[in-house]
Structures are given as structure tokens and as C-alpha cells.
Image: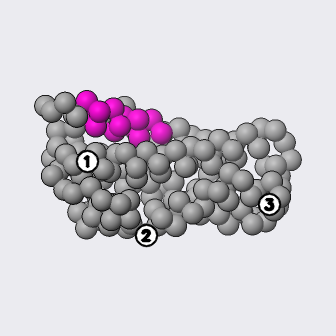
Amino acid sequence: MTALAPERERLARLVEREDVHLRAVRHRLLGDDWRVDAGRVSGLLGDDTGIDRLESFGAKFARMQDTVIDKLIPALLLAAGEPVMAAIDNLDRMERLGLVAAAEPWFEMRGLRNRLVHEYIDQPGDPAAALERACRFTDRMHADYALIRSYATTHLGIACGA
């Protein structure tokens, strides 16, 4: 085991927890119905609990992306003997390796973060589509993390359990 192995395992466990927390707050925010329109966003913004859940979802959504893209993927590429490059190149490499379904949605969703965190107060109609897409992308992140976790465990010997 290399000196970096414990850090890789720590990152994998961190993403595991972030995934659980993100899906839980998404459920508290919208339940099982992820259809979102301006009226639903206005309803969420109509009470403190809705605002708190919306802000929590945006923060957890951004945090999991940051951890996966900026920390976990480079650590796993390094462990696999792959070059570590810019985030876009790393995600493209992960796609070619079959460890994310597609790189492009990760960047599309990264662009939603400011809309989820900042713009909802002034223009509730605008973030409705972004919120709905982010809720759906949560499942994409979950599925891609399952691919990454399986590869890390099987091929790199990295313990990824919660």
C-alpha cells in the first residue's frame, strides 16, 4: 500500500457520504416528483424550510461535483498510472475508461451551480429548469460514482465502503 492509498480511501468514503446526503436532501426538497416549475420554486421560497432545503441541495450538489472532479478523479487516475490533466481532460479519460457514462453532462451541471445557489431569489422561474435538471443529474452522479467505486475496489484495491 502506498502512502497515498489512505488518502484515496478517505476521498472515496467522503464521496460515498456526499452521495447519500445529496440524495437525501433531494428527497426532502422534492420527494419523488422532480418536476419543477416556477410555481413550485415560488412555493419552496415561501417558507424557511423550503429555502433551507433548496440551499442545502445546491451546496451538496456543488460539493459532490467538486470532490469527484477536483479530488477523487485525479487521485484515481494517478493510482491507475494515468496522467492527471485539466478537469475536462480527466473527465474525458474517465469516459473512455468507462468510469463515467459521459463527460459532457458533468460540465453542463457544473454550470447550474450558480443558478441553484444565487439566482433563485430574484427570478424563481429561471432556476426551475436548472433545479429539475440538477435533481435528475444527481442520479447520474450516483451511477457514475458506483462505476468509479467498483473500479477502484476491483482494480486498485481501494476500500470505498461507507
Helix, strand or loop at label 2? It is helix
Residue 81 location, x and y as percent? 15, 52
Label 3 to label 2: alpha-carbon separation = 26 Å
Q: Assess disc 2: are there few (<14), some (14-19) or many (≥20) residues with their C-alpha within 10 Å of its C-alpha.
A: few
Q: Earlier in the sequence, mark 1 or mark 3?
A: 1
Residue 104 location, x and y as percent? 43, 69
Quarter location, residue 133? bottom right
Helix, strand or loop at label 3? It is loop
Residue at mark 3: 124
Q: Assess disc 1: are there few (<14), some (14-19) or many (≥20) residues with their C-alpha within 10 Å of its C-alpha.
A: many
Residue 32 location, x and y as percent? 62, 51
Q: Amino acid at mark 3?
A: Pro
Residue at mark 2: 104
Residue 100 location, x and y as percent? 34, 60
Q: Amino acid at mark 1?
A: Leu
Q: Is residue 150 left or right of residue 110?
A: left
- For residue 57, above or below residue 92: above
Residue at mark 1: 76
- For residue 147, above or below residue 48: below
Q: Nearer the viewer, residue 44 or 82?
A: 82
Label 1 to label 3: alpha-carbon separation = 39 Å
Q: Nearer the viewer, mark 1 or mark 3?
A: 1
Q: Earlier in the sequence, mark 1 or mark 2?
A: 1
Q: Assess disc 3: are there few (<14), some (14-19) or many (≥20) residues with their C-alpha within 10 Å of its C-alpha.
A: some
Q: Is residue 2 left or right of residue 47?
A: left
Q: Is residue 143 magenta?
A: no
Q: Is residue 15 magenta?
A: yes
Residue span colored magenta: 6-18
